[in-house]
Image (cartoon, helix red, strand yellow):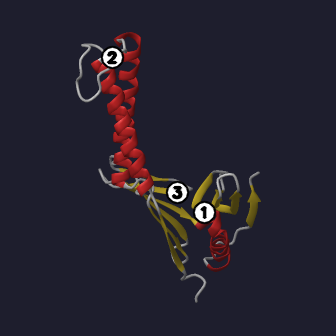
Amino acid sequence: MAKYLLTIVIPQFGTKKYISLLFCAATLILGVSFLNTGLSSFPKRNIFFVFPVQTEFIPQGLVMCVYGTIGIILGLFLILTFYWNIGSGYNIYCGREQNIKIYRSCFPTERKLTVHNYARLIRTSFQNYFLLEYPFRVISKLKFKYKPQVNKVSIIAQLANGRMIPILSHEATEKLMVLQLALILVNYVNLEVPLELTVDN
């Protein structure tokens, strides 16, 4: 396989997981329950399904209204992150174009195009994704990092200006695959930079 023609595409998973959906549902249910209890404490009668017999509106009911409102807002936010699958996408390591492209889903934003010496950022108008392009020439080092506390391994690109860009993260059970990918990037995609292996204690 020609060294300069190799292209690697690695998918990245976002927030669309069953555990995330369960957390969204639990947060919304708790938020509605707290808000209902707080509001029911003011007229001293059942508004929805809970009758707060011994709850006074000030201060307990008011505090529960605040907690309930925060819980509902947080639950709706989590539902949106699940719906748009925030953080999902893919990485493209392109030997032909000599760059790394990072595609990620995000919240809808206005059109934005930024070009400078280290990256090219593209956001399409009111679309929930963005595309980052990093030329190989601005990458000074690759770091293979293992974090035993969270059981994660990752590949981090250090740019010429010192900025760290995480380009891949996986469970530690796949650390051999991640290390092999780092070696492929260094040896076969013409990313001629040193590879540093680190372990965070």
- In this rendering, does residue 133 appear at all? yes
For the point 70% across and 59% down, the residue is: 146
Distance of mark 1 from mark 3, alpha carbons? 28 Å
Mark nearest the camera among 1 and 3 is 1
Q: Tag 2, which secondary structure? A: loop
**Total count of labels:** 3
Q: Tag 1, which secondary structure? A: strand
Report the disc number at residue 119.
3
Q: Tag 3, which secondary structure? A: loop
Q: Position of residue 104 (x, y in %)?
A: 44, 58
Q: Is residue 167 above or below residue 177?
A: above
Q: Is residue 17 above or below residue 51?
A: below
For the point 41% across and 57% down, the residue is: 18
- In this rendering, does residue 107 appear at all? no
Report the disc number at residue 53.
2
Which residue is tagged 1? Answer: 171
For the point 69% across and 59% down, the residue is: 145
The three-letter amino acid code for the residue at tag 2 is Val
| Residue neighbourhood size for the residue with mark 1, other residues' Cα within 10 Å, grouped as few (<14), some (14–19), many (≥20) | some
The three-letter amino acid code for the residue at tag 3 is Ala
